Image (cartoon, rainbow, N blue to C red):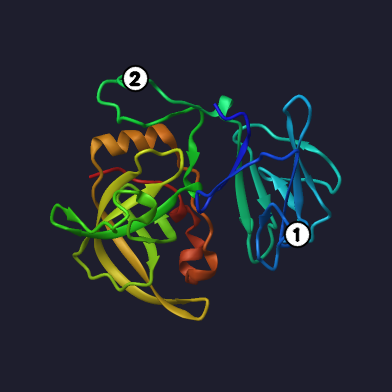
């Protein structure tokens, strides 16, 4: 088993192995992880490993701060990391949830991969058992066209990270799901939603039926708010969702909502029952 810890980008699923004694994150191109965002400092924070294989994160006097889970780290202080902790960079008005969020993992403490044929009857080959649930806001959501029983999958095969288009969700419930899209989906269309994460193998899938499509604007561009009903969420995928995902709410996209929607903050949590 790989002895090195990893950082996983909670929004893209990209993984970085911490193979060096000191690992720097920042905007400067010499950083081990280079993040070309205005709100990230040139040398934002560093992660170090001591002789006992214990990892710490230290803020390097960044402009908008480094946060361990939700707690700010004082500049120059070594904050100990544990598997599953979230490192958030630059929580500010433009990025209330953090400009970047990384999940720290130590493999020996994280997942157990069962032997072939082991585990519960009917378990998917290659599926991992999680020691802790994945936060809903850390999933990547992708949608694609569903035509009868045939799915349009890109040439890369069944890799869920290459399926359809990635979309930001505004609402996730067991009866309805809202998302933003560059494509004007048509009411009545059936589409497939995949919930993607490096530790969800295979991805969790459910079928949506488009109910309404409303033009809106974001970042000066025309986009569409797509309102869908959950048409099918089979028992297997539903059970995997409850077993693997913690429904703690979605990333905030308040700047995209109307004033009325902003008052209904509960819309960003999992609610309701399946029909």
Residue drawn at 27 percent across, 43 percent down? 274
Quarter of the N terminus within the rendering: top right
**Residue 194 x %, y %:** 34, 50
**Residue visible at 23% across and 40% down?**
234
Residue 123 versus residue 138: which sits nearer the camera? Answer: 123
Q: How far across and how far down the image is residue 5, in percent? A: 63, 35
Left of 239 or right of it: where is 96? Answer: right
Q: Nearer the viewer, mark 2 or mark 1?
A: 2
Q: Is residue 9 above or below residue 90?
A: above
**What residue did someone put label 1 on?**
64
**Residue occupying the point 67% across, 65% down:** 93
Query: Hey, which quadrant is residue 142 in on the image?
Result: bottom left
Q: Nearer the viewer, residue 251 or 193?
A: 193
Which numbered tag is attached to residue 119?
2
Mark 2 / mark 1, whichever is N-terminal: 1
Q: Position of residue 147 (x, y in %)?
A: 16, 59
Give the SS element for disc 2: loop
Within 10 Å of disc 2 (Cα), the crowding (few <14, some 14-19, many 20+) is some
* Whole-percent x, y for residue 148 in the image: 13, 56
Horizontal side of residue 179 vs 110, given as left or right? left
- Return the mark for residue 250: none
- Residue drawn where x is 14% and y is 52% of the image: 149
Q: CA distance from mark 2 to mark 1?
A: 45 Å
Identify the secondary structure beneath mark 1. Answer: loop
Residue 194 drawn above or below residue 258: above
Q: Nearer the viewer, residue 225 or 13?
A: 13
């Amino acid at each position: 088993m790989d002895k090195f810890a990893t950082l996983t980008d909670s929004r893209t699923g990209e993984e970085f192995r911490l193979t060096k004694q000191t690992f720097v994150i920042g905007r400067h191109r010499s950083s081990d992880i280079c993040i070309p965002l205005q709100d990230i400092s040139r040398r934002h924070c560093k992660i170090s490993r001591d002789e006992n294989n214990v990892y710490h994160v230290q803020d390097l006097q960044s402009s908008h701060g480094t946060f361990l889970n939700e707690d700010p780290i004082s500049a120059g202080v070594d904050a100990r990391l544990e598997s599953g902790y979230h490192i958030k960079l630059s929580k500010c008005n433009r990025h209330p949830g953090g400009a970047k969020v990384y999940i720290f993992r130590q493999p020996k403490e994280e997942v157990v991969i069962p032997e072939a044929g082991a585990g519960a009857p009917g378990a998917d080959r290659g599926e991992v058992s999680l020691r802790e649930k994945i936060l809903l806001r850390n999933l990547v959501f992708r949608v694609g066209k569903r035509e009868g029983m045939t799915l349009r999958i890109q040439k890369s095969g069944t890799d869920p990270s290459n399926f359809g288009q990635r979309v930001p969700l505004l609402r996730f419930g067991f009866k309805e799901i809202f998302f933003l899209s560059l494509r004007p989906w048509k009411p009545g269309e059936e589409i497939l939603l995949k919930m993607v994460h490096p530790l969800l193998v295979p991805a969790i899938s459910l079928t949506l039926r488009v109910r309404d499509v409303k033009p809106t604007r974001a970042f000066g561009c025309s986009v569409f708010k797509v309102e869908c009903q959950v048409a099918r969420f089979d028992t297997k995928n539903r059970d995997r969702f409850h077993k693997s995902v913690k429904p703690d709410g979605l990333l905030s996209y308040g700047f995209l909502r109307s004033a009325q929607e902003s008052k209904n903050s509960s819309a960003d949590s999992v609610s309701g029952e399946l029909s």
